[in-house]
Amino acid sequence: MKTAFFASALFLCVFCSSSCQNPPVPPEVEKAKSQENDLWRAGAPLYAADEYARYLESLRLAKEKLIRQNVRLRWFRDYKEVRSDYIVILGQGDALIQKVQAEKRSQSQDFSQRLGRLEERMGKIKALTQLMNEHAPVRESLARAEVVSREAQILLRNEKYTELAPKLDLIDGHIRQAEEALFSILARYADDSQVARWRKLADDTVSESRRRGTTVVLVNKLARTLTLVKKGKEVAVYEIGLGKYGLSDKLYAGDEATPEGRYKIVKKNAQSRYYRALLLDYPNEYDKRQFALAKKKGLIPAQAAIGGLIEIHGGGNDFLTNGCVGVENSVMDRIFPEVAVGTAVTIIGSLESVDKILAGLRISGS
Amino acid sequence: MKKFSRFLILGIFVVSLFSSCAKQPTQAIDAAKAAIEAATKEGATVYAADELKKLNDDLQAAMDEVSTQGKKFFKKFGTAKEMLTKVQADADALKATIPAKIEAAKNAAIQAQTEAKAALDEAKALLEKAPVGKGTKADIMAMKADLGGLETSFAEVQTAIDGADYFGASAKAATIKEKATVISDQVKAAIEKVKGKR
């Protein structure tokens, strides 16, 4: 009886010790745990969500198999199948890491190209703002786009692609605002019929100069040039400055636009506050009709006057006039003796349509 | 009788030895999960993503241990309970650190906002007193317009702070400061250019 008692106690001790000891596991189990961590860090849930989910499911099933082996008495455990499963999972994980890295490279390239195209559009628009004084709303939108673009560059560098996508959309939105502001200013310059009218004005002026053997002045607002034409031949081209809203056609006093149309010099002032000045006969009959029409339609303030005192004057070509055409004093020295009271001065918007330039902005979209 | 008593005592000993380990640590599991949930709600996903991942991994390891013991005939949940208790403690400790991290991120965002404002004010002041001379007026006009855009963007920094997007606010403020500083440098160069010609 004593023997039976101690035999039972001994059996129980052996049984308890065998049940309580930690079972050995294949080394692939720990490797898979580390690999799962690596995949998470690499962003597998983001860049290969489906494959990552399948990988986790395989891991879960393998773990269950492992647990089933672990609960057996140690002499009855067989980890062969478990090890095979984990080896397959490790292979899956390696392939998944490759895929995640490839996906990140692809996204990096894609976002980088998209950001590059957006920045190209911004550059083109910025260059166009050099053509005009009234660029404030365009540049303000561009500045906002540039702020977001800089943030996007940082996100791209840090591989934060989920945050990057909405930033690119935001940049695109600001650029579109800049484009709309630009188009509203330059709309007339993309209107073929308007450009055709300007060309005709210019051609008629040059033809008159040729026919009469006279000197005429041709001002091109978009090109920022003043051309001296003698007997139908271009003899000199000079750079000019315009009003703050110089690209617009002058409508009333204080609008700071430079008028368009056919004018004549009515006075030569050699002692102007702007060095020397050539006073034009703005407003002509056409201007008066347009002013009356605009007032009737309520397009201008009821108390607005039509304005006047439009000149070609010295003082420089890089400052904002109130609507006059500004030139350097040295240029004024060359023009002043060549013209007289009665000399024709034709002011046009442009000889070329900007349609292609504006279309190019829209085509090279993000 | 004596023999019977001995076997009875032995039997009672064995049963009591293993019955104390037999209950699943449900309370410990719930407590650990609740602690992780609390840390997540506090903001661990944003401010301590790596630590949160480790907690979830540790919880999973503890649950695996529970699962392993649950399948045994003589169950012993002592180790699993210890693991769960540690997860709960770690989660509580992590949760305690989050407010300080949020506060630090918020302070950094406010500091960046202040610096951006200072840079904008400096650029604005320089542009106001920039002498308009040959070759500078058009540039100054353009810079004023650019500054206008930056000021509009600056308002978004406060929006981000109000929405607790402190990292986003810091990034935006830093960019605005950078661009405003560029404007200031350009204005200073323009001022020097005019001074040099006088």
Image (cartoon, helix red, strand yellow):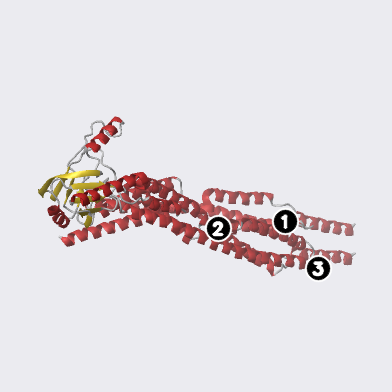
Residue tagged by mark 2? B51
Q: Quadrant of the C terminus of chain B?
A: bottom left
The image quadrant where one finds the N terminus of chain B is bottom right
Which circle marks residue A75 in the picture?
A: 3
Element type at mark 2: helix
Question: Residue A12: horizontal and vertical position, in percent?
Answer: 81, 63
Provide residue A146's location: percent of width, then percent of height.
39, 54
User: Is B84 situated left or right of A16 in this image?
Assistant: left
**Of A332 and B183, which appears nearest the observer?**
A332
Q: Are marks 2 and 3 in contact (CB under 8 Å)?
A: no
* Disc number placed over residue B12 in the picture, else none: none
Q: In this rendering, does residue A146 appear at all?
A: yes
Residue B67: assigned label: 1
Residue A234 in which image quadrant: bottom left
Query: Left of A189 or right of it: where is A237?
Result: left
Q: How far is the residue under mark 1 from the one under mark 3? A: 21 Å
**Residue at the limit of the structure toward the front, as seen here:** A211
Q: CA distance from mark 2 to mark 3?
A: 39 Å
